[in-house]
Amino acid sequence: MLETTIIILILLTAILSSKFLAKKPLQPQIDIPRKPFPTEWKSILEKQWPLYLRLPKELQDQLEQLTLLFIERIDIRGAEGLKITDEIRVLTASQACLLLVNQNTFFPDKLRSVIIRPKGYTATKQEAYGGIHTEKNIQVLGQSWESGLVVLSWDNTKSGAQNTKDGRNLVLHEFAHQLDQADGLADGAPILGSKEQYKQWRKVCTRVFADLQQKVESGDKTVIDYYGATNPAEFFSVTTETFFEKPYYLKKKRPELYELFAEYYKVDPLTWN
Ligand SMILES: [Zn+2]
């Protein structure tokens, strides 16, 4: 385990260093439009997503405009006979767009489609150890592909919205992967603004990630879900869920990580009532 941790840390350091130097294209800059947000859609958010009601008015406005943009740009399609309704469309788009408020950017251009399945499903996971490739079937709730496709299960999209304090939100999780993958690398570091920010990101995340892995190994209680110890990419997505849904505990237990995420997402969920 320790060897694995060290190898991952070395890789993370190398990737983060090369990432900044490589000057990958940034996410598209956007001008948020000012269009009317349908009353029925607002009522879906008010009824189904308690977090929306806690947002300051200014962020609600931004979120509504981003939701309109998302629905205009991204193809949301049902699978296995699931018919896409306004409820599905709005609840999916708005949860994803929470990651974008105050950012003046949108998801990477390569993000084109979201496929919604009725429930969790079985996916094939490919693994390679020591030159041996294996495939196994695993149960998943959703997936994010670097090519620009996100797959979600509707039952978890809905329950994730309804329970806003358990630190688990499928949509935030999968779309955080899209932000991480924006530069083509699923390495746990999204596109940041400065060399100093990358340095700080590497420093804090490397330390907390290693600590989380140790705690998972010894079965200790953690504020960040155990799944975050899987690899740096999952660490970023799981911490994103914790940041938005358990800000009090994240700040209490990992203040330096909370500050880092507050700086990146440009919001402070602790101040939302
Ligand atoms: Zn994930």
Image (cartoon, grey):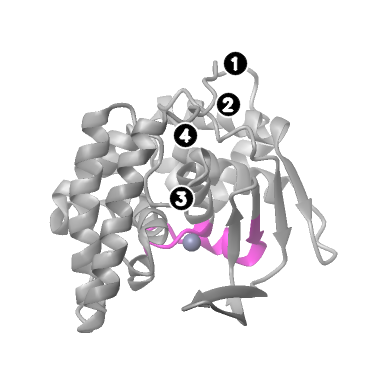
SS for dot 2 = helix
- Towards the viewer: 103 or 91: 103
Q: Which residues are magenta?
A: 151-170
How packed is label 1: few (under 14 Cα within 10 Å), some, or many (20 or more)?
Answer: few
Name the residue tied to disc 1.
Answer: 34
SS for dot 4 = helix
**The disc labelled 2 sits on which kind of residue?**
Gln
First in residue order: circle 1 vs circle 4: 1
Q: Quadrant of residue 266?
A: top left
State the separation of the CA atoms marked 1 and 4. Answer: 16 Å
Q: Residue at x 37, y 45 (%)?
A: 189
| Residue 273 appears in the figure | no
How packed is label 2: few (under 14 Cα within 10 Å), some, or many (20 or more)?
Answer: many
Q: Residue at x 54, y 24 (%)?
A: 28
State the separation of the CA atoms marked 2 and 4. Answer: 11 Å
Q: Residue at x 59, y 60 (%)?
A: 143
Mark linked to residue 65: 2
Percent coordinates x, y for residue 244 in the rendering: 36, 49
Q: Which image quarter holds the N terminus?
A: bottom left
**Labels 2 & 1 near each other (Cβ < 8 A):** yes
Nearer the camera: disc 3 or disc 4: 4
First in residue order: circle 3 vs circle 4: 3
First in residue order: circle 3 vs circle 2: 3
Name the residue tied to disc 3.
Answer: 50
